[in-house]
Image (cartoon, coloured by chain):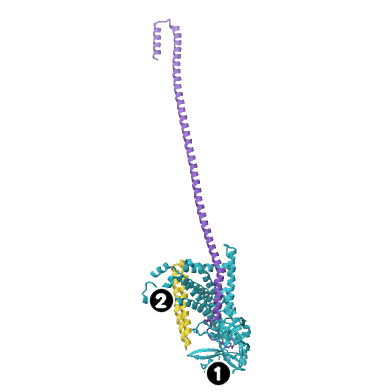
């Protein structure tokens, strides 16, 4: 049963990161649409932020594994 | 255009079907092999094949002679265990496995009572059909599914000794399932210990009786990839020296834009004037991670999961931690330990502990992010391919396997494309964050005050 | 998959093996410090040198272009000046030519006027002289005629004397 609770935790982590990355991507697209000349800066910051969000999710997943 | 896509699709499906047909053939063969294995086992220890769910006592490891060896998937119908397969494929091994072959690698092993042992893992008598398990024990070391383990039993004879096979025992400790690997020797199952790990028991490892310092699969891949890249870079540097100011050619054309990108987009914005000092570190980190990420994704070349191993990312993160804190200026330390303009009580109880925690968490997230991304990618690809066997029910329903293979191959292809992207992004992110941490630590005084006042 | 039991059910990549740690340290330090010194530093230096080279060349080209531009404008200025000079010379020449022509014309006119006036005066004089001459001649002729006539008729009466007298008066009137 422990495994299934871990699976729920992993799923929650994935949901959170998914929302976060989605918002980052959406906002980045809006920003690019508004200022196409700043695409380089926006992309770099987008990837950086997405990686940070994703990192949080992955750490949550690893902690979920550890607790299991 | 559509025609081209259809052709491409047809090629993929054909490849997938071939893969599946081979796999299914292999599965059809397997029961006989399994039988053979059973006979071998039966001769010595029948209990190894009793699927006995009740007999794992939890104290078995203390009394190996009384243990009831129990296999997780020891039925006559070999059940495909996707999780175990994925775990096996991402782990570091003492053999280099390409397809069904397990190529021997040098083993360097150290046990406290026994000293240093140095030999090739071919001495174990690698069995290609069994994920590279060995037939012999060498100085109490055995090769269990490509991984060197040691027999704890101190009475076990040294030198080359034939062993009968391996089993695993499931025990329950504090409500958690634990697996103990066993070796069958002359009808007696003897417990094995894994090599020492540096996680201090957090992840279920810890210091055991021996240290495995071998040129393992990951080390071999690392040496190969880094050696090749070193050669390329040295030849590039030589060309720059020999013919300065000429147009780039060959490898230069490939690496020059990447190096310039890292210099202009990563190093200069974060490090400012001091960027030149840290460029070798940033380039080394980037190409180390990128090279190994990409090498791990080449199918049929072992797919060594080097950057998806915590040891590798831990070394990188610790080096980044050392570089950041050695280069941290007075201002950096002031901000961590005694932030100006904040009440002393807040500093002592809140800010300083949080900042110190932040100093440690930064490299930890670096380590975990790379590790988790690459490991997850490898696992997902393994599991997508495993879908074929899950649907095929280990050869019972080849039709389902054929059907699943189409989806599986397409999913795998999609995942590989994503992983290709991830390989670059993770290398870039690691480098970028390293640069930003170093930049924050070496920031000039007045800059910091401006930021603080904002 | 064959029936071989996948024994190692543990998630081993998360357990950092001492051997892998050691080898990673060795390999990465070699890659960073030695390859960094042998390859990365020279490459970065060469790239920056080349970038500077290109920048210098661009700057040089820019200055050369500016020089060329100033040279061209100088040339243009000189040629414009020359053109103006030429125009001025031509204009002057034209002016002086015109002046000369006008002067010559005036002179010629004056001369002609003078000649005409002289001629007119001469003619007048000649006419006067001729008239005097004619008068004289006519007088002489008249005298001659009169002489003849008188010769022929003088012997006659007083009538004739009157007549002569009248004649002479007529001549005097003329």
Q: Residue B105: percent from the left, percent from the top? A: 61, 81
Which labelled disc corresponds to residue B31? Answer: none
What is the chain letter for disc 1?
A: B
Left or right position of C98 against B40: left
Q: Is residue B391 left or right of residue C148?
A: right
Q: Please state which of the two labelled residues, at mark 1 or mark 2, is closer to the viewer.
A: 2
Residue under numbered circle 1: B66
| Depth check, front residue: B399 or B112 | B112
Q: Colour of chain C?
A: purple
Quadrant for the C terminus of chain B in the image: bottom left
- Colour for chain A in the figure: yellow
**For the residue labelled by badge 2, is the local secondary structure a helix, a strand or a loop?**
helix
Q: Position of residue B42 (x, y in %)?
A: 61, 94
Residue bearing the label numbered 2:
B352
The reply to whether the C-beta atoms of the residues labelled 1 and 2 are less than 8 Å apart is no
Q: Which quadrant of the figure has residue B222? A: bottom right
Location of residue B386 in the rendering, given as x and y in whole percent from the top left corner: 55, 83
Residue neighbourhood size for the residue with mark 2, other residues' Cα within 10 Å, grouped as few (<14), some (14–19), many (≥20): some
Cα distance, mark 1 to mark 2?
54 Å
Quarter occupied by the N terminus of chain B: bottom right
Identify the residue shown where x is 51% and y is 55%: C63
């Amino acid at each position: 049963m422990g495994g299934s609770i871990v699976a729920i935790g992993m799923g929650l982590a994935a949901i959170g990161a998914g929302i976060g990355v989605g918002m980052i991507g959406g906002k980045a697209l809006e920003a690019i649409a508004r200022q196409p000349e700043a695409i380089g800066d926006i992309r770099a910051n987008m990837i950086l932020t997405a990686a940070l969000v994703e990192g949080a999710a992955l750490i949550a997943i690893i902690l979920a594994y550890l607790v299991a | 255009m559509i025609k081209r896509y259809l052709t491409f699709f047809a090629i993929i499906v054909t490849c997938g079907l071939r893969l599946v047909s081979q796999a299914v053939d292999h599965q059809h063969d397997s029961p006989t092999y399994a039988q053979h294995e059973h006979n071998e086992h039966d001769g010595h220890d029948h209990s190894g094949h009793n699927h006995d769910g009740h007999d794992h006592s939890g104290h078995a490891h203390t009394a190996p002679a009384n243990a009831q060896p129990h296999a997780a998937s020891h039925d006559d119908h070999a059940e495909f265990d996707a999780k175990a397969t994925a775990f096996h494929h991402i782990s570091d091994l003492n053999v280099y496995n390409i397809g069904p072959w397990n190529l021997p690698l040098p083993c360097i092993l150290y046990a406290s009572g026994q000293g240093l042992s140095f030999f090739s893992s071919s001495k174990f008598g690698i069995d290609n059909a069994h994920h590279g398990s060995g037939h012999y024990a060498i100085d109490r070391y055995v090769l269990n599914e490509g991984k060197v383990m040691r027999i704890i039993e101190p009475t076990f004879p040294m030198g080359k000794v034939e062993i009968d096979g391996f089993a695993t025992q499931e025990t329950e400790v504090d409500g958690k399932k634990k697996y103990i690997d066993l070796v069958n020797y002359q009808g007696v199952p003897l417990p094995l210990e894994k090599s020492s790990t540096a996680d201090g028991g957090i992840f279920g490892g810890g210091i055991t009786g021996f240290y495995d310092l071998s040129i393992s699969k990951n080390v071999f891949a690392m040496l190969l990839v880094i050696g090749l890249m070193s050669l390329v870079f040295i030849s590039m540097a030589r060309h720059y020296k020999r013919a300065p100011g000429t147009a780039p050619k060959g490898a230069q054309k490939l690496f020059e834009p990447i190096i310039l990108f890292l210099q202009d987009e990563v190093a200069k914005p974060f490090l400012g004037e001091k960027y030149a000092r840290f460029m070798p570190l940033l380039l080394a980190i980037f190409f180390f991670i990128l090279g190994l990420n990409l090498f791990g994704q080449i199918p049929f070349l072992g797919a060594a999961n080097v950057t998806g191993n915590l040891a590798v990312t831990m070394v990188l993160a610790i080096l980044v931690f050392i570089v950041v804190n050695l280069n941290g200026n007075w201002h950096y330390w002031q901000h961590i330990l005694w932030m100006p303009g904040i009440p002393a009580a807040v500093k002592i109880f809140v800010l300083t502990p949080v900042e110190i925690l932040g100093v440690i968490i930064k490299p930890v997230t670096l380590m975990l992010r790379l590790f988790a991304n690459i490991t997850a990618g490898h696992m997902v690809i393994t599991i997508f391919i495993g879908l074929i066997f899950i649907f095929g029910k280990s050869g019972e329903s080849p039709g389902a396997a054929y059907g699943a293979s189409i989806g599986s191959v397409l999913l795998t292809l999609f995942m590989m494309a994503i992983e290709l992207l991830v390989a670059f992004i993770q290398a870039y992110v690691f480098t970028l964050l390293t640069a930003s941490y170093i930049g924050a630590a070496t920031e000039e005084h007045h800059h910091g005050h401006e930021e603080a006042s904002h | 998959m064959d029936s071989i039991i996948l024994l190692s059910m543990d998630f081993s990549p998360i357990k950092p093996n001492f051997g892998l740690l050691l080898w990673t340290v060795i390999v990465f330090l070699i890659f960073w410090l030695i390859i960094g010194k042998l390859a990365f530093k020279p490459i970065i230096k060469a790239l920056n040198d080349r970038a500077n080279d290109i920048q210098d060349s661009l700057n040089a080209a820019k200055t050369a272009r500016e020089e060329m531009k100033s040279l061209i404008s100088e040339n243009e200025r000189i040629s414009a000046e020359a053109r103006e000079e030429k125009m001025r010379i031509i204009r002057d020449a034209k002016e002086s030519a015109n002046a000369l022509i006008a002067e010559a014309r005036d002179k010629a006119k004056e001369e002609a006027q003078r000649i005409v006036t002289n001629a007119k005066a001469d003619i007048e004089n000649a006419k006067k002289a001729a008239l005097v001459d004619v008068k004289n001649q006519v007088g002489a002729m008249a005298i001659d005629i009169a002489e003849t006539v008188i010769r022929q008729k003088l012997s006659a009466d007083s009538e004739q004397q009157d007549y002569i007298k009248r004649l002479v008066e007529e001549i005097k009137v003329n």
